[in-house]
Amino acid sequence: MNSNSILCAILGAAAIFASCKKEEVYTIKVTPETATVYTDETLPKLAVSSDPATALEGKTIEYVSSAADVITVAPDGTLAFAVKDVEQDQNVTITVTVGKEVATSVITVKAQIGRYEVLSIKGTGLQILDRNVGAKSKDEIGNYYQWGKNEPVAANAETAVNANYSADWSATAAGIVDWTKPENTPCPKGWRIPDGDDMKALDAVLENIALWDWDMCSKQEYLDACDALDSMGLIPTGKFQAGKDGKYLASASYFWSSFVDSEKGTVGMFENNLFPLYSKKATYDMAVPVRCVK
């Protein structure tokens, strides 16, 4: 072998050795690997790790969502819902790539309606969800909302409002949304907040509970009204009194109506205290639970 051949052999071996030294062997993992989230909950924060732990240093991590119309993923791996709700459960795969290494996280997205059972209010033609928005069970209170604001001002048994509460909230407040449109409300897809006609139909049935005491309805009408009230499955929830003090009043059961009195700047509210009553006297800064119908 001549000197040139020897030199080429040495250089070739050196190149192979250098190439092998650059080939770093590692694996990656993303957590959580699986998660189940309702569309009104917070998506998990993804964490990417490697073995060895230092393998990610100086490397680019790429994220891709298999359904960006449901869940988007930012360049830093932050997940966000692209929809308010879904028609049915969906699996969204977040693929994480570092060099040639790939790992996935599968997020099962559940429709909000999956939390609820559907109740029929006797004598009204209305269906109502078995619990207030935000309640994990039908025995919980759920979230408190001010009219046209989708961020809860309190949750479940909390007796103090949070930073989302505004004592000056009104029909002209910045950020208010039109709750007369179902897609703008906290309700699950396909459901809405009761409107004025719904509430009048409900009141026409339930008013016989009060009229019975005045001998102004038959016993059967009274019993039918009691059945209608029972079928609603309401629980005492209380309300946050309108005004700058934000005082919590523990008595009664409430849910909103989307009826708006434009002249008085008030919204409709169902109240079950001594007697069931549909009232149009609640101001925008009042905070009460939301019960959805259709």
Image: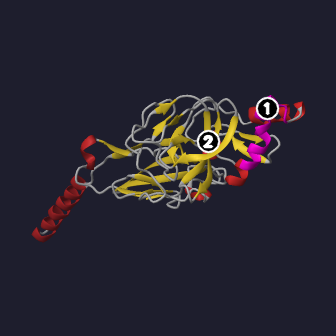
Main secondary-structure element of the magenta-colored stretch: helix
Q: Mark 2 points at which residue?
A: 255
> Residue 201 location, x and y as percent?
76, 48
Outermost residue on the left side: it is 3
Residue 276, compared with residue 281, is above or below; it is: above
Q: What whole-number distance in Å separates the C-alpha atoms at marks 2 and 1?
A: 18 Å
Q: Could you tell me which residue is drawn at 39 percent across and 46 percent down? A: 46
Q: Is residue 209 magenta?
A: yes
Q: Nearer the viewer, residue 37 or 238?
A: 238
> Residue 237 location, x and y as percent?
57, 32
Q: Which kind of residue does numbered mark 1 sit on? A: Cys
Q: Nearer the viewer, residue 76 or 121?
A: 121
Q: Nearer the viewer, residue 218 or 151?
A: 218
Badge 2 crowding class, 10 Å Cα cut-off, few under 14, some 14 to 19, many 20 or more, is many
Badge 1 marks a residue whose secondary structure is helix
Q: Mark 1 points at which residue?
A: 226
